Image (tube, rainbow, N blue to C red):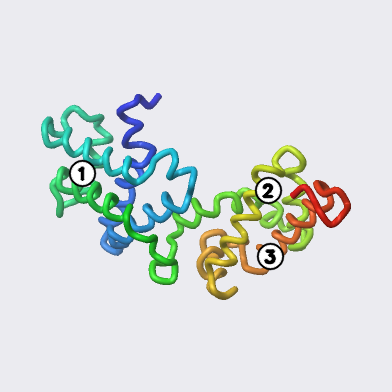
């Protein structure tokens, strides 16, 4: 069982930021600043994430960890945490300096607008997080048993009635967000569809149509005004 100190590095914002720093250490890895911009964009674009762990709190945790390491070194930390910090810092940073940089960067980004995807494309991990609900509806599309229209209806029907007001409603919002975020069908397919292969422009439009039809038929009152 992971104890409370290990969880700080294994999950949550500190663990995620250190994972991104490790990715940036790879010879062909992304720039650390770009990874942090994406992290901040994900947090700021989600009201849930911002409510639970705003960027100011992330920066504060990084500062606290830097203070701890500056005062006592890493000897008191769990072994895997020491290893994770060392891999995140690489040969370029003392651990304390890396943590200070991460704290300062996330703090500064808190007052800057999120970069538009046209300037900083979404990475695969960002797409998986941002469109996680879309991915939850994948089964009928990857089974090979249905046409696209049939798969869309099966995806929606499979969540009825318990999850219509939660997951299915969230699905409609994510699809609209994706259709608005990418300027052309080709751009959506090359980005979101690259990370979630079945989620093409045409498939998402068919799935959105199935959601709205289901809401009107199963949750409406049969007149022009509906409960959805």
| Viewer can see residue 29 | no
Q: How many marks?
A: 3
Mark 3 or mark 2, earlier in chain: 2
User: 91 or 133, which lies in front?
Assistant: 133
Kindly check if marks 3 and 2 are in contact, taking CB atoms under 8 A apart as contact: no
Quarter that holds the N terminus: top left
In which image quadrant can residue 196 be found?
bottom right
Find residue 161 and report its horizontal and vertical position in percent.
77, 40
Q: Label 2, on which residue?
A: 168
Alpha carbon separation for disc pair 3 and 1:
45 Å
Can you name the residue that lies furthest to the left here? Answer: 71
Alpha carbon separation for disc pair 2 and 1:
42 Å
**Residue drawn 59% across the image and 66% down it:** 179
Mark 2 or mark 1, earlier in chain: 1
Tell which tag, 2 or 1, sits nearer the viewer: 2
| Viewer can see residue 46 | yes
**Residue drawn 27% across the image and 54% down it:** 108
Q: Which mark is residue 195?
A: none
**Residue drawn 25% across the image and 41% down it:** 62
User: 61 or 29, which lies in front?
Assistant: 61
Q: Label 3, on which residue?
A: 205
User: 15 or 105, which lies in front?
Assistant: 105
Q: Label 1, on which residue?
A: 86
Mark 3 or mark 1, earlier in chain: 1
Q: Is residue 197 above or below residue 187?
A: above
Find residue 195 and report its horizontal and vertical position in percent.
51, 60
Can you name the residue that lies furthest to the right here? Answer: 222
Give left or right: position of 62 versus 138.
Answer: left
Q: Secondary structure at mark 2?
A: helix
Give left or right: position of 82 versus 193.
Answer: left
């Amino acid at each position: 069982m992971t104890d409370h100190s290990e969880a700080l590095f294994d999950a949550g914002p500190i663990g995620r930021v250190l994972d991104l720093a490790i990715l940036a250490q790879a010879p062909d890895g992304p720039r650390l600043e770009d990874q942090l911009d994406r992290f901040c964009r994900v947090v700021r674009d989600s009201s849930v994430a911002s409510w639970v762990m705003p960027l100011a709190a992330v920066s504060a945790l990084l500062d606290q960890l830097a203070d701890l390491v500056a005062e006592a070194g890493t000897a008191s930390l769990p072994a895997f945490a020491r290893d994770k910090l060392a891999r995140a810092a690489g040969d370029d940073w003392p651990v304390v300096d890396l943590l200070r940089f991460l704290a300062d960067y996330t703090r500064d980004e808190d007052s800057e607008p999120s970069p538009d995807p046209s300037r900083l494309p979404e990475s695969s991990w960002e797409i998986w997080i941002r469109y996680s609900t879309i991915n939850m509806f994948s089964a009928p599309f990857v089974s090979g048993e249905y046409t696209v229209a049939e798969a869309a209806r099966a995806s929606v029907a499979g969540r009825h009635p318990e999850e219509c007001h939660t997951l299915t409603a969230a699905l409609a919002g994510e699809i609209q967000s994706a259709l608005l975020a990418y300027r052309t069908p080709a751009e959506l397919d090359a980005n979101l569809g690259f990370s979630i292969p079945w989620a093409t422009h045409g498939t998402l439009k068919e799935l959105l149509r199935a959601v709205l039809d289901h809401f009107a038929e199963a949750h409406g009152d049969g007149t022009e005004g509906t409960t959805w």
